[in-house]
Amino acid sequence: MSQPEPREVDLRQFASKVQAFGFDFVLEEFDRSWHAPEGISVQTPYTEYLRSKGRLEASLTAADSVQALMTEIGHPLKLSDVDVPESKFMDIAMHAVADPAVMFNPRPPGGPAGILEVFKAAK
């Protein structure tokens, strides 16, 4: 099977939104770059910052190490790893919106629909 042509996706245009949402959004942007399909380089304000400080590769290596450790010890990485069927996502999302950690999150998830999006991405 041939490797896809390397592509670059530049998300730096959203820098003002990243700053408005704070650190948790920055981590989410970094997570997007880490989980990008093979052959695609995702540029975010955070990856740009890490690259400017010479720390991007070290950060990606650290993230890979954490994932390897979690895999080695059998820690689930996706909802499907713990047999959560997609048909239950909305029920769980409805309960999640009542959780104080979600209710007082500085970045509101957008109700059950927003939480459902996170679940679908984590399946």
Image (spheres, helix red, strand yellow):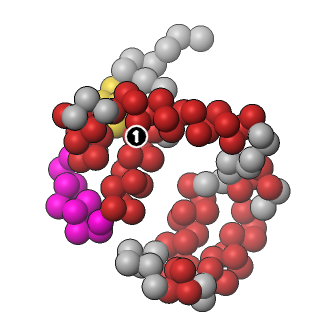
Q: Nearer the viewer, residue 122 or 101?
A: 101
Q: Where residue 5 sits in the image (x, y, percent)?
A: 39, 18
Q: Compared with residue 7, is residue 79 higher up or lower down, i.e. above or below? A: below
Query: Looking at the image, which residue is at 33% across and 26% down?
Result: 7
Query: How many numbered marks have been drawn onto this rendered protein structure?
Result: 1
Residue 13: say if magenta: yes
Find numbered disc 1 in the image and state the secondary structure of the residue it sits on.
Answer: helix
Quarter of the image where one finds residue 20: bottom left
At 60% from the left edge and 85% from the top edge, which residue is drawn?
A: 99
For the residue pair 2 and 33, the one nearer the viewer reads as 33
Disc 1 marks which amino acid?
Answer: Ser
Dominant secondary structure of the magenta stretch?
helix
Left or right position of 114 against 33: right
Asked whether 109 or 100 is in front, the reply is 100
- In the rendered image, residue 80, in percent from the top left (x then y), is placed at 75, 52
Residue picked out by circle 1: 33
Provide the residue span drawn in magenta. Answer: 11-22
Question: Where does the N terminus fall, quadrant-wise?
Answer: top right
Instruction: Quadrant for residue 98, please give it.
Output: bottom right
Q: Position of residue 22 (x, y in %)?
A: 29, 66
**Mark 1 neighbour density, 10 Å: few (under 14) some (14–19) many (20 or more):** many
Q: Quadrant of residue 72?
A: top right
- Asked whether the viewer can see residue 36, the reply is no
Q: From the viewer's perspective, is 55 left or right of 60?
A: left
Assess whether residue 106 is covered by the magenta stretch.
Answer: no
Tell me if I can see residue 82 in this picture. Answer: yes
Residue at left offset 24%, top offset 47%:
45
Q: Is residue 65 above or below residue 49?
A: above
Q: Residue furthest top?
A: 2
Vertical side of 121 occupied by 112: above or below: below
- Identified at 62% across, 80% down, the residue is 96
| Image coordinates for residue 121, horizontal then vertical, percent | 56, 55
